Every structure is written in structure tokens, then in C-alpha cells.
Amino acid sequence: MKIALVGYGKMGKAIEAIALQKGHEIVLKIDINNAGDFTKGNLSKADVAIEFTSPHSAYDNVKQMMKWGTSVVCGSTGWTEKLEEINKLCKEHNSAFLYASNFSIGVNIFFELNKKLASLMAPHPEYAVTMEEIHHTQKKDAPSGTAITLAEQIMQQFPSKKRWVNNESTNTGELPIISKRIDPAPGTHSIKYASAIDDIEIIHTAHSRTGFASGAVLAAAFLKDKKGIFSMKDVLGF
């Protein structure tokens, strides 16, 4: 598989290492120093582009690649309020698009566990639910995209939770997410249900970027030669 890396920071380099290890070829690497190479002609050399940049550039990058008909795996977070527009462009231009707030296989299993636990806890209002996420200090968005995904899953089971907030809260209509930025933490997410009698807590802790990079390469291999809109649930067969 021929891969274009749009974003060549720490995640891009981790993806490159995994891709090469698996026998894939990196045909293009785009970062701030060679933005002029981000062209339709250069992207056409790749079977799939993997986009990991920042909340400020991801939307424009993906929007342009959808118009070019490029197959894109995107892991940039902090811009998903525009995701529906990208999905529409994907259909209009017969492209292929796969977005995930987290590509780690372990985290995607954690998502399924979170949904199940939330459904079990919903009938028990004596338990107050809170969330915490910890990342390295270079992470620009807070809360993390993974935390937002987890919060949205919980709110689907708790109609009383009208929104998540990125601070402590005693408002029963709010789901608190506490964000901490501590080096060199690659990512920890926890959900706690606390009552006067006991606590129930689930935690996922990443030890490195390897899990995210491996999942992104797996997603790219899945997306190759496909058209349409997909998710990690499609990749993993959940």
C-alpha cells in the first residue's frame, strides 16, 4: 500500500515506522516546511492519505482531499463540528473517508465497554458520573476527542445529561470532564460512577503512540480501494 502522510509530527513519524515495518511505502510526507507539495498530483500517487495535524488545519486539509477524490484516514481532533460537511463532500466526490477520535484497538474496545457500563448504570441515579483525561502538554485541544466520544456515548444512555463541560460541576444536567496536561503522558481516560456506598471506575491507559499508529495503518489498509464513509467499528467488525 502506498501512503501519504499529511502531518509529519510525532504521530506521523510513529505511523511511518509502523507502516514501513508492515511493508507499506510512504510516497509523500507533508509538514509545515513543504506545504507547497500538498497538491492533487502528489496525493494521487498514494492509495490512502493519513491526516494527523491540528484542529486548525485538519478541516481544510480533509476538505481539499475530498474534492480531489483522495481516500483519507483522519485522526485529528478538535474540529468535528464540521464533520457532517466533510461526509457530504465525500459522497459528492465519490471519495473514501474514515475518521476516528482514537485509532487504538484497545480504546475502541474501551468505547464498547463504556457504552455497556453506561446502559447498566443509567437506572441508578444514586451514582454520579464524572470523567477525567490526561495527555501530554503538547496536545492542543481539551477535552480530548476520545473523551468527547466517551461523553457522547454516556449521554445517549442518560437523557438527563444535556451537555458535557470541561470543568468540575454539581449540575445534574452536566457531565464533567476534567482535563489534565502532564508530560509525557500519551493518554489516559477514566470514567467513574460514585455513590455513598461504592465507586465503579473503568480506565484506559496508553503506554505509547504505537497503539494509535498501528490502528491508523490498519484503518488505511481497510480503506484502500473502497468508496464511502467508514469508522473504526467497520475496521474492527464490532
Image: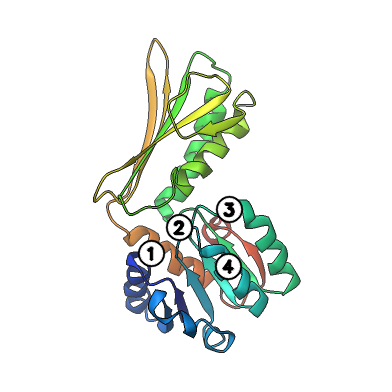
Q: CA distance from mark 3 to mark 2?
A: 16 Å
Q: Give 138 or 69, whichever is nearer the viewer.
A: 138
Label 3 neighbour load within 10 Å: few <14, some 14-19, many 20+: some
Label 4 neighbour load within 10 Å: few <14, some 14-19, many 20+: few
Residue 1 is at least partly visible in this image: no
| Amino acid type of the residue tagged 1 in the rendering | Ala
Q: CA distance from mark 1 to mark 2?
A: 7 Å
Dot 2 or dot 4, earlier in sequence: 4
Measured as percent of width and height from the top left, residue 88 is found at 72, 63
Q: Circles 1 and 3: CB distance less than 8 Å?
A: no
Q: Residue beneath label 1, please?
A: 213
Q: Circles 1 and 2: CB distance less than 8 Å?
A: yes
Instruction: Identify whether 38 is placed above or below 222.
Output: below
Label 2 neighbour load within 10 Å: few <14, some 14-19, many 20+: many
Judging from the image, what secondary structure is the residue with disc 1 in?
Answer: helix
**Residue under the point 57% across and 39% down:** 152
| Amino acid type of the residue tagged 2 in the rendering | Phe
- The disc at residue 204 is none
| Amino acid type of the residue tagged 3 in the rendering | Thr
Dot 1 or dot 2, earlier in sequence: 2
Judging from the image, what secondary structure is the residue with disc 2 in?
Answer: loop
Instruction: Identify whether 41 is placed above or below 221.
Output: below
Q: Circles 2 and 4: CB distance less than 8 Å?
A: no
User: Which label sits in the foreground, 1 or 4?
Assistant: 4
User: Which label sits in the foreground, 2 or 4?
Assistant: 4
Q: Residue beneath label 2, please?
A: 103
Dot 1 or dot 3, earlier in sequence: 3
Q: Residue beneath label 4, please?
A: 60
**Residue under the point 38% across and 75% down:** 19
Q: Is residue 83 left or right of residue 132?
A: right
| Amino acid type of the residue tagged 4 in the rendering | Asp
Q: Residue beneath label 3, please?
A: 80
